[in-house]
Amino acid sequence: MGMGTTLVVNPGSSSKKYALYSCGKQVMFFRFEKTGKGFELSTQVTGKQLQSESLTEDDFTNSILKLEELIDKYIFREHISQIGSVVVRVVAPGTCFQQHVEIDDDYLSKLEAKSKVAPIHVPIILREIKQVKKIFPKVKIIAASDSEFHKDMPEHARIYSIDTKDTQDLDLYRFGYHGLSVSSIVNRIHGVIGIDPENLVVCHLGSGCSVTAVKNGKGIETTMGFSPTSGLPMSSRAGDLDSSALLYMMAAKGWKTKEAELYLDTRGGLVGLSGKSDIRTLLDLKAKKDERADTALNTFAYNIRKAIAASTAALGGIDVIVLTATAAVRSSELRSLVLANLEYLGVIISKDRNEMMVSKDGIISVHNSSVKVVVMRTDEMGEMASIATKF
């Protein structure tokens, strides 16, 4: 299909992001967000001021309808070609979801079947795809898989130690997620540091968190497994919890699986540990000697450090660490907390460089640090737009 105009759709539970790409460049960006005060839409036309307006819940739920109106005006005004393809980020457990594909009815029914397994992500994605199909009935709709990057992980990293027959019959593997984010880093890192590292560790620290080991551009290990709830503690997701502890809680509280899933997704992580999900709020509280905030942040950082060390073991060495996604890019304080005591790996941070690096890309380690530490903004939307050009 080559270039043309592509709509990128990246739906989450509390925010939905959309972008319009024309001839490979982003020309418009939209964020529909559920805030403490209600619902909000931010619109950014490239090169112009960001516009914000408040929305009704109905506008938020049917964001595509609101979007259609804004995009039509823009296309008409700027004389760019009509939308030729729509690309949607898909986060779902299953081997068949580990590839970027054009969405057809067969794909949709496979996705429907996963609604119960992934009640947080899948229903939202399904609703977006159905709305897109209604509004753009003739347009090609592409699924950008969030786990495609991890599909070639070695078998010993992909499997759980359960009965092999169950693994195969139930398609129960460690799929990994944040693949679009990680591949956007891998594809752009050369431009930031002048090399393509052999042993790279990517720490994606946003409201979801993961650490991925990348060997010569290929994912070989990652913290998220079957679901995006697993691995590290996150803003409200628990990360790994002993399965017996979960079974015990389910029995004690009389939960069905959906309630247990909801608990792991919304009452875990920083929220579970401190009652707060925002890292900046927690850092402020920590500075005021708030014990719960201190414990939450230390637990968070400790688990990321362990994952960096585990990635090093998987890779057999480490050359570069990249910190990406909102929390990591925004806060130098969080970065120094996460990277404390990694000198034994050869990680030495420059205090000055770290403090200067806010919402821009660059190196924050000292010149003679044997491991380069890099802060980079992730670009899932750009990655998705470039996937769409291959169809």
Image (spheres, rainbow, N blue to C red):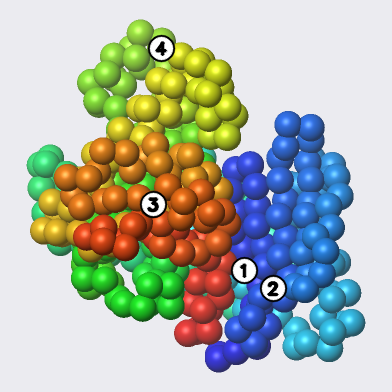
Residue under the point 50% across and 71% down? 383
3 or 4: mark nearer the eye: 3
Instruction: Give the camera-side residue of 173 and 71.
Output: 71
Q: Earlier in the sequence, mark 1 or mark 2?
A: 1
Tell me if 348 is positioned left or right of 255 in this view.
left
- 65 to the left or right of 186: right
Residue 24 percent location from the top left of the image: 60, 84
Q: CA distance from mark 4 to mark 1?
A: 41 Å
Q: Nearer the viewer, residue 170 or 325?
A: 325
Is disc 2 placed on a helix, strand or loop?
strand
Sequence-first disc among 2 and 3: 2
Q: How would you rate the neighbour count of disc 2 (Cα within 10 Å): few for under 14, some for 14-19, many for 20 or more?
A: many
Identify the amino acid type marked 2: Leu
Helix, strand, or loop for circle 3? loop
Vertical arrangement, residue 67 with respect to residue 24, above or below = above
Of circles 3 and 1, the one toward us is 3
Residue under circle 4?
A: 254
Q: Residue furthest top?
A: 252
Q: Which residue is mark 1?
A: 8
- Per the image, label 4 sits on a secondary structure element best described as loop
Q: Which residue is mark 2?
A: 20
Q: Residue at point 66% right, 75% down?
A: 26
Mark 4 residue type: Gly
Tell me which label, 4 or 1, sits earlier in the chain. 1
- The alpha-carbon separation of the residues under discs 3 and 1 comes to 37 Å
The one of 163 and 235 positioned closer to us in this rendering: 235
